[in-house]
Amino acid sequence: MEPLPGMEKLKRVTIVAESVVSERIQEDVLRLGAKGYTTTHAEGRGSRGVRASEWEGHNVKLETIVTPEVAGKILKYMEDKYFQHFAVIAYTIDVEVIRAKKYR
């Protein structure tokens, strides 16, 4: 497939976290330079096992498209602020977008 005119490479940052820190992470992502994000309910199993009850709450998956510089800031902040104390994972994927100005 030939690239479309105006296509630009950016990063999609995905963060999966326990719901107790979801709102804080949303605020952090915006403060670190993201222009917006999408959140969805997430379920799964990982190093901390499976959430066994409503009492523990659900997981939230947050996705945002940002420049590589902002992606680096977000990942570093997640590592420093959340990884040690909460069930949080974060990763990036290269994406190609049209209307890249929307994400800057």
Image (cartoon, helix red, strand yellow):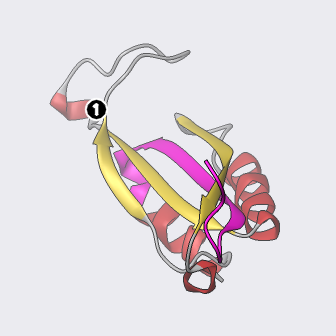
- Magenta stretch: residue 3 in it? yes
Per the rendered image, the range of residues in magenta is: 1-22
Residue 84, placed above or below residue 2: above
Residue 3, placed above or below residue 36: above
Could you tell me residue 17's position as x and y percent?
Answer: 47, 42
Nearer to me, 4 or 73: 4
Nearer to me, 7 or 75: 7
Q: Is residue 68 left or right of residue 102?
A: right
Q: Amino acid at mark 1?
A: Glu
Residue 5, placed above or below residue 38: below
Q: Given the current orientation, which residue lies at the most extreme left position?
A: 54
Could you tell me residue 102's position as x and y percent?
Answer: 55, 84
Of the 4 image quadrants, the one containing the C terminus is bottom right
Could you tell me residue 21's position as x and y percent?
Answer: 44, 53
Q: Residue at (25%, 17%) from the top-left corner?
A: 52
Q: Secondary structure at mark 1?
A: helix
How many numbered tags mark residues here? Answer: 1
Q: Is residue 76 left or right of residue 46?
A: right
Residue 2, placed above or below residue 31: above
Q: Residue at (41%, 46%) from the top-left corner?
A: 61
Q: Residue at (41%, 56%) from the top-left corner?
A: 22
Q: Given the current orientation, which residue lies at the most extreme front position?
A: 2
- Magenta stretch: residue 34 in it? no
| Residue picked out by circle 1 | 56
Q: Quadrant of residue 71?
A: bottom right
Q: Is residue 19 left or right of residue 76?
A: left
Could you tell me residue 47's position as x and y percent?
Answer: 56, 15
Q: Residues within 10 Å of mark 1 (few under 14, many from 20)?
A: few
